[in-house]
Image (cartoon, grey):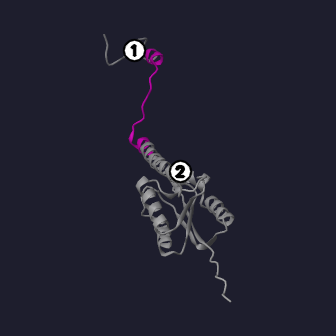
Amino acid sequence: MTQPKAVLALQAGLYIRVSTKDQALKYSPDVQRSILSKKAEDDGVTVREEHILLDKQTGTNSDRPGFERMQALAQSGAIQIVYVMSVDRFARNTEDALRVARLLKEWRVRLVIADLPMDIQTPEGELAYTQFAAFAQFQAAQIKKYARGGRDRRPTTIRNPTTAQQRTGGQSKTACSS
């Protein structure tokens, strides 16, 4: 008589990232943890406390302690699934998002994006993931552009010609007078 094989429970990691106070409202660590924990539970997957990884900085580079720890756990086989809220919480650099997703696949670790309603291992899911990764990078560039623009640009005054004429005694002063 043979002994039944033990069924090992899949181990998952939750990767949580927040970088600004505004994001903390919609994507607070508690909100992300709650949603991702529920998703893992629904999938019948175990999440150990030490596999809940949090970063509080930009996703535009991959030098983040939680992100690096998640990869180390995946490579070592300690986790077989990584849950993340959205592609922009995972990475805001298209190359990093694609590179790490490819590494996870090589290590036989499934990447689950909670707000992406498809498996990114399928051709359709891979296409959607790639598009969302590119859009996340675009959003980061736009945020940086507008934040820098607000600091670097001098305030501009829009002049109403009617008001200008009233202030100058009825004559409008312009750079090009005839």
Task: State the SS at label 2.
Answer: helix
For disc 1, the marked residue is 172
For label 1, the crowd category at 10 Å Cα-Cα, with few meaning under 14, some 14 to 19 and many 20 or more, is some
Q: Quadrant of the C terminus?
A: top left
Q: Position of residue 118 (x, y in %)?
A: 59, 53
Residue at the extreme bottom: 1
Q: Quadrant of the N terminus?
A: bottom right
Q: Is residue 157 magenta?
A: yes
Is 43 situated above or below 177?
below
Q: Position of residue 82 (x, y in %)?
A: 55, 65
Alpha-carbon distance for marks 2 and 1? Answer: 61 Å
Name the residue nearer the viewer: 17 or 113: 113
Q: Are marks 2 and 1 in contact (CB under 8 Å)?
A: no
Q: Decide if residue 53 is on the left or right side of residue 35.
A: left
Name the residue nearer the viewer: 37 or 31: 37
Q: Is residue 138 magenta?
A: no
For disc 2, the marked residue is 124
For label 2, the crowd category at 10 Å Cα-Cα, with few meaning under 14, some 14 to 19 and many 20 or more, is few
Q: Say which label, 2 or 1, has the lower sequence index.
A: 2
| Extent of the magenta region | 147-165
Task: State the SS at label 1.
Answer: loop
Q: Position of residue 124 (x, y in %)?
A: 53, 50
Identify which residue is drawn at 43% across, 55% down. 60
Is 154 situated above or below 74?
above
Residue at the extreme front: 1
- Which dot marks residue 104? none
Q: Amino acid at mark 1?
A: Ser
Name the residue nearer the viewer: 118 or 31: 118
Q: Position of residue 86 (x, y in %)?
A: 56, 54
Is 161 situated above or below 31?
above
Q: Amino acid at mark 2?
A: Glu
